Image (cartoon, rainbow, N blue to C red):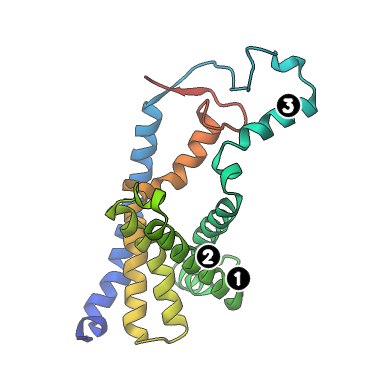
Amino acid sequence: MNMTIFSNTVFLDFIKGPMVWLSFIIFGLGLIVQTIRLLKLTRIKEARRFAPDAAIVPQTDLSKWERFTRYFAFLRITVLGANACLVLVSFIFHVCLVITPIFVLGHNVLLDTSFGISLVSFPEQISDILTKFVIAGGLLFFMRRLFLRRVRMISTVNDFILLFVAVAPFLTGFLAYHHIFNYNIMIVLHILCGELMLMLIPFSKFFHMVFFFISRFMIVSEHSLGSPKRSWQY
């Protein structure tokens, strides 16, 4: 591989400077635009939260134990009841995907050097383990989409591309940290993959990281938490 581009000072300065700012600007503005767009699809409306068999037995007449058993029965027909192991793996994958870049030592050193802001950082061994969780989870989801027939039927090329984009920053960072292959190439690819993922978040299925909280806390009948006041406009 021609390594000239990976050692070009102008190119490196660009992806470590203006490209980083551009990525965060697109990410931030994209989140604002998409959130406003999502809220325009809903409206404030007083509505009762869903309660199983509410028409038969008023919710207020149920004991705490009966309410618990009814909601537990409802959970059995969700993905949590169908495949609790997959939910656990997905939860660990998403948590590691979000917190690792924020608390990894290398990123916080750069943040401190550039802006004088110092955050709490994980020990390098912990960050390495969390990175392995993300890579392993990504491999599991890839194999699941590839070999599980019911999942493969609803998977598109775009799903595989987005999965690769999500895992690529962690894979390249892992390879660079352990000096597997050429370090300069891996660290450049790591930066580019991270910037690409940031820019794609507002305009792809990655936006579910924001939509999850909006739907759970603001929109009625979306397995809502708290007391949501908005409903979809039909």
For marks 2 and 1, the one nearer the N-term is 2
Amino acid carrying mark 1 in the image: Phe
Count the marks: how many?
3
Q: Which residue is mark 2?
A: 100
For the residues carrying marks 1 and 3, which lies nearer the camera in this image? 3
x and y percentages locating residue 227 in the rendered image: 60, 26
Residue at screen point 37% across, 47% down: 205
Mark identifier at residue 122: 1
For marks 3 and 2, the one nearer the N-term is 3
Q: Secondary structure at mark 3?
A: helix
Q: Which residue is mark 3?
A: 67
Indicate the quadrant where residue 95 lies: bottom right
Q: Nearer the viewer, residue 148 or 84?
A: 148
Labels 2 & 1 near each other (Cβ < 8 A): yes
Mark 1 and mark 3: Cα distance apart in space: 41 Å
For marks 1 and 3, the one nearer the N-term is 3
* The residue positioned farthest toward the front in the image shown: 149
x and y percentages locating residue 183 in the rendered image: 37, 85
Which quadrant of the rendered structure holds the C terminus? top left
x and y percentages locating residue 166 in the rendered image: 40, 61
Q: Secondary structure at mark 2?
A: helix
x and y percentages locating residue 184 in the rendered image: 33, 84
Does residue 39 appear left or right of residue 220 in this picture? left
**Mark 1 Cα-neighbour bin, 10 Å: few <14, some 14–19, many ≥20:** some
**Mark 3 Cα-neighbour bin, 10 Å: few <14, some 14–19, many ≥20:** some
Mark 3 and mark 2: Cα distance apart in space: 38 Å
Amino acid carrying mark 3 in the image: Arg
For the residues carrying marks 3 and 2, which lies nearer the camera in this image? 3
Residue at screen point 70% across, 17% down: 59
Q: Secondary structure at mark 1?
A: loop
